[in-house]
Amino acid sequence: MDDDEVARFEAVYRECYDQITAYAVRRCDSPQDAADVVAETFAIAWRKLADLPRGGEARLWLYGVARRVLADQRRKSVRRRMRDVELDAEMVDLYGDPPEAGAELRAVAAVFRSMPDDDRELLSLVAWEGLGRDEIATMLGVSRNAVRIRLHRARRRFAAALSAADVHLTTGSRMIPAGRPL
Amino acid sequence: MNDAEEISRLLRPLARVEPGRKGSGGSGAGAQALLASITGRRSDASAVPGPDTVVARPEAVAAGSPAAPLAGPRRRFLLLGPRRLVLGLTAAALLATGVVVGPSLVRDGGGVAVSYANAAVDIRRDGDQYVARIKDPFAEYAMYTEAFRAVGLRVELRPVPVSAGYVGKILGMVIASKEAPDRQATPDPSGPRFGGVPLTLGTAPRGCEPGRSPGCVMVIRVPAGLTGRVDVRIGRQARPGEEYANFDAALAPGGMFHGVRLRDGRPVREILAEARRRELSAVFSLIRIDPKTGGLSFEPLPADRVDGGWTVWNAWQVKAGVVRLLVTPGRLPENPFYNGSAPPPALG
């Protein structure tokens, strides 16, 4: 591995570390799992450095790798740990006590958790990672049109699930869980 | 319900890390250590004098889930960081599926000792932990088992045969426990915690190599209430003809095929010539790829069924003087050992 390539990897690492970490932390129940996902994602990126795109696409490519690592981790009943305990400790900081979630937020969270994985992933890529359709298409390696259709369906299903759970929304303002005095 | 923006607005507060939050940019000690362990270089922030201790340690594990990327010998990796002997641990925690029934902490007068010593190991109670000092890492395996059992723990220290450069190195620590390690506690710098009590593995003096450096003692601290099994594997010199446990270190520094590049696959005839130059004999295994899961399995193959034009994708060191070449009849689009998310082997 020549010095230029190492430098390129280090630059990508610094640039994308926060985003990949946030991606992992948002989707893993424990800091240890998140640390595993981050460590594996960058280890794979290092091994496949030749495939790592230059410029802004590097981040999307890394999201794609992280997504597969995460799926793999969830599939396994016996976990493989690539543990770096200092990294664990830093992840723990991101898992601070959640603020007291109101009934509203808890209701939305429950509905969101009940959604199919693919829907949840698409909706959160938009809401949490702030990705646009083009970026999601690049990350997932599918057409922009496919993303548009899947996203549309995911939103429709989520809206339906919310209303099935009697969580109703007033556009642009707070939602009103059923049974709660206004 | 409105549309896209409304849904995003609803979901944003659910993100554990707030969207758009500015982070450390990878400047934390853990992030730096990870970077250093991946590239094999130390960055300024984690620079410490001392030998190169950044090593990925593969270890074969017998059982695993069918969906894992490698269906043959499986690998676990430990990352040994630059700061201490054991920065990382492989914790194979079988997640809790029911009520944990096990020995209580100390059965007063119930026959469980609080300290135990024999020629190989010395175990004492220290608060919530048992501290085991391994005086002789290559003693009869039964001596450790006996000592740990006497204090009610299931810790197994297994010397496994390895190639010369790996003697005295810890190949892996596997924790099989119904209790998952603590998830929310701040991790101890040297190991996972169970019920708030850390399980650590280190040496005294710090950084020495058990069985190699004179006076080097391996120290294992185990939560006194741990009901699971801890399995520590340490490399010992293989006897003549004995197969290596570090079989997939062939291409790593010190391995018998170090310096051979197989990342993009190489023709069998070239690699055979290389083996001859190194005075190694070669055996073969055919790589099979499960079409559904992408998992790999390996089938031993007599040399006369392998053509010189086949492709070698990886090599294992079987035992002294013998290398196993992992082959396919045709070329594959990419090296299957790089496929999937398993940490890939050092393919040179």
Image (cartoon, grey):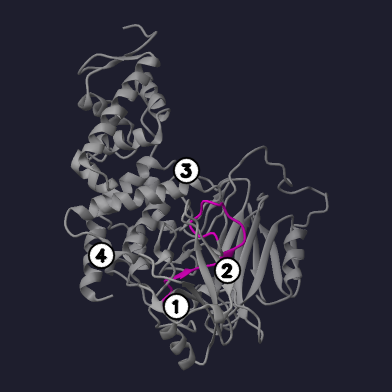
Q: Give the range drawn in magenta.
A: B50-71
State if disc 2 and disc 3 touch (CB < 8 Å). no
Please report, as a chain letter, where disc 3 is located: B
- Please identify, in this view, whether the residue under mark 4 or under mark 3 is nearer the observer: 4
First reached walking from the N terminus: tag 1 or tag 2: 1
Reading the image, the residue beneath label 1 is B252
Inspect the image, locate mark 2, and give the three-letter code of the amino acid beneath it.
Glu
- Locate the N terminus of chain A by quadrant: bottom left
Q: Residue at 38% x, 19% y: name it.
A: A103
Residue depth check, mark 3 versus mark 1: number of the one nearer the observer: 1
Cα distance between the residues tagged 3 and 2: 43 Å
Q: Which chain carries label 1?
A: B
Q: Can residue B178 be seen in this view?
A: yes
Q: How far apart are marks 2 and 4 (CA)?
A: 37 Å
Q: In percent of the image, x 56 and y 71: which residue is there?
A: B170
On screen, residue B9 above or below B263: above
Q: Mark 2 points at which residue?
A: B299
